Image (cartoon, coloured by chain):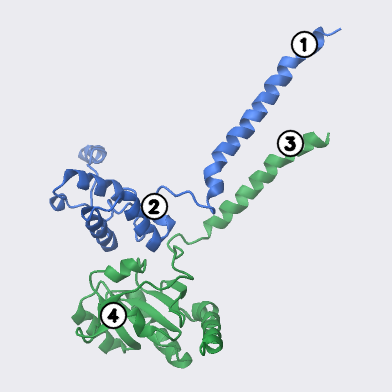
Chain colours: A blue, B green
Amino acid sequence: MSRLLACCLLFFAANAWAIDPSEKLPDPEQQAMFESIANEVRCLVCQNQTIADSTAPLAADLRREIKRMVVEGQSEAEIKDFLVERYGDFVLYKPRFRSWNLLLWVAPAIFLIIGAVAMINIVRRRTQLPIDEDAP
Amino acid sequence: MQNMRLKFLLPIAAFVALVVVFYNGLYEDPTRVPSPFIGKQAPAFELPSLQNPAEMVTEETFAGQVSLFNVWASWCPGCAQEHALLTAVAAQHGVPVYGLNWKDERSAALKWLQRMGNPYKAVAYDRENIVGIDWGVYGAPETFLIDSKGVIQYKLIGPMTPDIWQQEFLPRIATAREELANGGEG
């Protein structure tokens, strides 16, 4: 019974954050910006974690660099450019629009168009049927 | 009739193509992230030498020759694994190897070199991972192949093996040396 309870309690466990709350930036706006960037950057050592989640030493180094740039007043785009320049597009969880992933970006639109064309064709054909019957 | 057939076959063809793409994806190693630096100028840096903190190691240190830049640390098992091979091939093919001692303690790194042997012409000491980040390093060992113009030709993530050396490094080193011999005068 107590084991079951312990298992259930696990579901309520808080997220384990790798960011040390005692190292918060004094400016809450800067802290928010830092956290938002850290939550969008992939930790390349333990992929599928963000550098905000990861306790890997490399993630800590990258958090330090991002913090430094935030304090220096760099924009979010500049900081992401810095990371992509060094670690490639894979480092961002939200991929950027590039020639090699163009298909990935436009595929939903293409499928939407195919679906729409198919639907229009089917609807048109069905609405035409009774009219044909009525024709002399 | 022809049209009906196409309508039937096209989705199947698309499905098969997708299966092929996904099947190939199964065998790709996601931990090997392609470096955005291939074919680009190596990032500039300046770090104290591991052995002599007063001396600086910079990207100028390996200018004008085809060289290897090897990221290592005393805590890294893959580095110990590749060390003998790296030492041997560098001596055999006359390729100078430079080291980036990464996220390490100076005393531990020096002891490691003493124990394992030192194939490096110079070792830059990057305890804080400043240059490591600039070079897009995310683990050790990593080995960059840099041509005489300071352009990164190849990056190996993980330990060197005889196969990788034969297949990836030797042909590129030969090409880079040919270019150096042809364009060296100009």
Identify the disc placed on residue A131. 1
Task: Name the residue carrying label 3.
Answer: B7
How many neighbours does mark 3 have within 10 angstroms: few (below 14), some (14-19), or many (20 or more)?
few
Could you tell me residue A11's position as x and y percent?
A: 27, 38
The reply to whether residue B160 is in sight is no
Of residues B59 and A8, the one drawn nearer to the viewer in this rendering: B59
Which tag, 2 or 1, sits closer to the chain's start?
Answer: 2
Residue type at mark 3: give it: Lys
Taking B39 as reference, is A63 left or right? left
Q: Are marks 3 and 1 in contact (CB under 8 Å)?
A: no
* Dot 3 and dot 4 residues touching (CB under 8 Å): no
Residue under label 2, please give it.
A92
Structural distance between the alpha carbons of marks 2 and 4? 29 Å
Q: Residue at x 50, y 52 (%)?
A: A98
Spot occupied by residue B13 in the image (x, y as percentages of width and height)? 69, 45
Q: Quadrant of residue A117?
A: top right
